[in-house]
Image (cartoon, grey):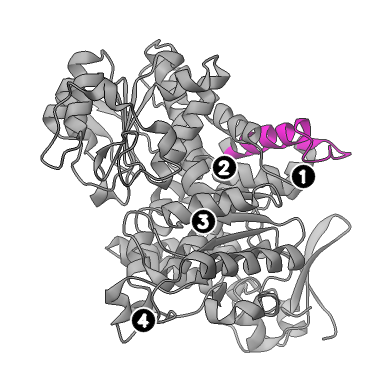
């Protein structure tokens, strides 16, 4: 019991076994109950006199915490408060956020987490998870043993090369795995005492960080090539040895390494990249719902994607696979896409087109009469003018890229344009929903990457759904962990996507949202977990539990509540 405690059960009830007492017990956020320790626990665990006299309930603690939260004005101040609470008492933190999900998810997760990442070294208060540095690459297994949580079901890891839309942020990237794991618990019911966030420190190319006297990461240019691959290989080997059957989630890796790492290990362990697969799945769910609303045949899509990086190509890959499931050949499915990268439309034979982008490159022959821009490429305005897309997706992190003339051109060619400005945080969104509705005379079907308030258009209030990965990845993880799936298959991803689309409010009301609201994320993700688990069994990567899938998932579903403690010998 190297961490000092163990989660177990007795007569069907969860309990914590620990040898920790006194101040040591109060300093473990996974165990600390604060003023809610009972009189009996205070006696047994040497807490008498260390706490105020009154014994409070969790509900009473939540009321006080919410009052404290409301006293802060800015989002980053609120983020710091909630993270401080997380570092003090995790049960209280999760109970508070769960009861205020719509208000607080944007504070602990996107978009505010981006500010927390940027200010990490300057605002540093307490270490979280594990920090594995390239220089310690031959000690990784030993360092994994130093974790706090003794049992681990899920690891979220990053090398912080491509954080949200703010790029290479070095050691501050640890906040991303922490935030993702919070969401796994809040929206997927996964036990936070069985999580492990890991930062893979391979250096940084952010010169500002390298020159910052407060910077806490490895002060070295980012490694690449064989050295990088060796380090990732040693990390994965150590994880597999220390945690057989763990679910490994990759987050915010650079666009080349993200795909390379996933492709390299997806057949040998249960692994997932949320930037590629999670973003793609929730976007496809929104697209499926939108096409049903406007009665557009899914295979008749003309899809323009601005931003051909990890997320953009991941979305295209997932939609392409769905188009093929709907009866198109791969060639026919690829013909539905026009992907635009930094230099313009992807064109066959053009310099700079990467291997994972190449399938989407258009033939030079079909572009002979198109107008080139000053750089010799084809920009978004020209592509929209020539193609007349039914769907426009933004993953570019270029604020305002969906300009008025471009959107009006699209609206002239498409009765109900589907427009998804997905870049986040909010200041990097390709367009504001207010403008999109104005420019399309209220006809656009919109989903955004960052949260936006409801829009008032011609006296009507229109809800703007968020293509938030929190609507899908927690259920995916809950289904995988709940039945111990050995691999994540494409069919499991599609099962998650189709389930999310099925529960979109628009199916009950044509004027409603094309995605469920964040406040419903927990219940939606439980349905996703069921679908994913059933598909895993069908795909032969998991065994059917004796008590059934639903009962097994219900049994594993964690809720924030205080459980009894048992004192044991150290």
Q: Circle 4 sits on which residue?
A: 215
Secondary structure under tag 3 reads helix
| Residues tagged 3 and 4 counted as in contact (Cβ below 8 A) | no
Give residue 329's position: percent from left, percent from top: 53, 18
Q: Residues within 10 Å of mark 3 (few under 14, many from 20)?
A: many
Q: Which image quarter holds the N terminus? A: bottom right
Q: Which residue is at 70% across, 80% downward?
A: 142
Q: Which residues are magenta?
A: 525-549
Q: Is residue 459 visible?
A: no
Closer to the camera, 524 or 139? 139
Residue drawn where x is 34% and y is 20% of the image: 302
Tell me the SS state at disc 1: helix
> Label 1 neighbourhood size at 10 Å, few (<14), some (14-19), many (20+)?
many
Query: What x and y, as percent, mark residue 333?
Result: 46, 21
* Sequence-wise first label, 3 or 1: 3
Residue nearer the viewer, 56 or 84: 84
Q: Is residue 515 above or below residue 168?
A: above
Q: Going from the N terminus, do you reach mark 1 or mark 2 first? A: 1
| Direction from residue 157 to residue 268 in the image, left or right | right
- State the residue at coordinates (76%, 48%): 484
- Label 4 neighbourhood size at 10 Å, few (<14), some (14-19), many (20+)? some
- Give the residue number, with chain letter if any, for mark 1: 483
User: Is 439 in front, or is 354?
Assistant: 354
- Mark nearest the camera among 1 and 2 is 1
Gap in angstroms between the C-alphas marked 3 and 4: 23 Å
* Residue located beneath label 3 in the image: 180
Q: Earlier in the sequence, mark 1 or mark 4?
A: 4
Mark 2 vs mark 3, CA separation in Å: 14 Å
Q: Position of residue 341 (x, y in %)?
A: 29, 42
Which element carries disc 2, helix, strand or loop? helix
């Amino acid at each position: 019991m190297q961490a000092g405690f163990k989660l177990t059960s007795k007569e069907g009830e969860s309990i914590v076994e620990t040898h920790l007492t006194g101040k040591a017990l109060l300093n473990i956020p996974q165990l600390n109950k604060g003023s809610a320790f009972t009189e009996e626990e205070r006696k047994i665990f040497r807490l008498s006199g260390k706490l105020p006299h009154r014994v409070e309930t969790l509900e009473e603690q939540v009321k006080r915490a919410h009052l404290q939260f409301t006293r802060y004005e800015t989002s980053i101040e609120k983020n710091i408060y909630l993270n401080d609470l997380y570092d003090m008492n995790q049960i209280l933190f999760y109970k508070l956020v769960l009861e205020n999900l719509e208000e607080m998810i944007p504070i602990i997760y996107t978009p505010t987490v981006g500010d927390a990442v940027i200010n990490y070294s300057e605002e540093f208060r307490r270490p979280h998870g594990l920090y594995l540095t390239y220089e310690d690459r031959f000690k990784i297994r030993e360092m994994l043993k130093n974790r706090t949580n003794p049992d681990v079901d899920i690891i979220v890891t990053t090398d912080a090369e491509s954080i949200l839309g703010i790029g290479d942020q070095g050691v501050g990237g640890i906040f991303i795995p922490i935030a993702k794991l919070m969401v796994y618990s809040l929206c997927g019911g996964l036990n936070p005492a069985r999580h492990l966030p890991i930062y893979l420190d391979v250096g940084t190319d952010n010169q500002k960080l390298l020159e910052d006297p407060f910077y806490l990461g490895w002060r070295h240019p980012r490694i690449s090539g064989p050295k990088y691959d060796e380090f990732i290989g040693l990390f994965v080997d150590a994880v597999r040895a220390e945690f057989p059957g763990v679910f490994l989630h990759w987050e915010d890796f650079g666009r080349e390494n993200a795909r390379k790492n996933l492709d390299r290990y997806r057949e040998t362990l249960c692994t997932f990249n949320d930037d590629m697969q999670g973003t793609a799945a929730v976007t496809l769910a929104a697209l499926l719902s939108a096409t049903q609303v406007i009665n557009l045949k899914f295979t008749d899509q003309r899809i323009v994607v601005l931003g051909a990086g990890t997320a953009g190509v991941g979305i295209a890959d997932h939609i392409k696979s769905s188009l093929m499931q709907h009866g198109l050949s791969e060639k026919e499915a690829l013909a539905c896409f026009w992907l635009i990268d930094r230099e313009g439309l992807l064109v066959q034979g053009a310099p700079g087109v990467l291997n994972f982008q190449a399938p989407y490159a258009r033939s030079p022959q079909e572009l002979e009469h198109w107008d080139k821009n000053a750089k010799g490429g084809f920009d978004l305005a020209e592509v929209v003018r020539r193609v007349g897309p039914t769907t426009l997706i933004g993953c570019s992190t270029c604020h305002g890229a969906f300009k008025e003339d471009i959107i009006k051109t699209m609206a002239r060619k498409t009765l109900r344009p589907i427009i998804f400005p997905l870049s986040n945080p909010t200041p990097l969104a390709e367009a504001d929903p207010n403008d999109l509705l104005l420019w399309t005379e209220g006809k656009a079907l919109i989903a955004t990457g960052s949260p936006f308030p409801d829009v008032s258009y011609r006296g009507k209030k229109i809800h703007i759904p968020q293509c938030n990965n929190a609507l899908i990845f927690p259920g995916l993880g809950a289904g995988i962990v709940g039945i111990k799936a050995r691999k994540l298959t494409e069919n499991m991803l599609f099962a998650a996507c189709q389930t999310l689309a099925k529960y979109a409010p628009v199916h009950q009301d044509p004027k409603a949202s094309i995605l469920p609201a964040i406040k419903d994320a927990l219940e939606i993700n439980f349905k996703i977990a069921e679908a994913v688990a059933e598909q895993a069994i069908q795909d032969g990567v998991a065994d059917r539990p004796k008590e059934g899938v639903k009962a097994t998932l219900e049994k594993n579903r964690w809720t924030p509540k205080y459980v009894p403690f048992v004192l044991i010998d150290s």
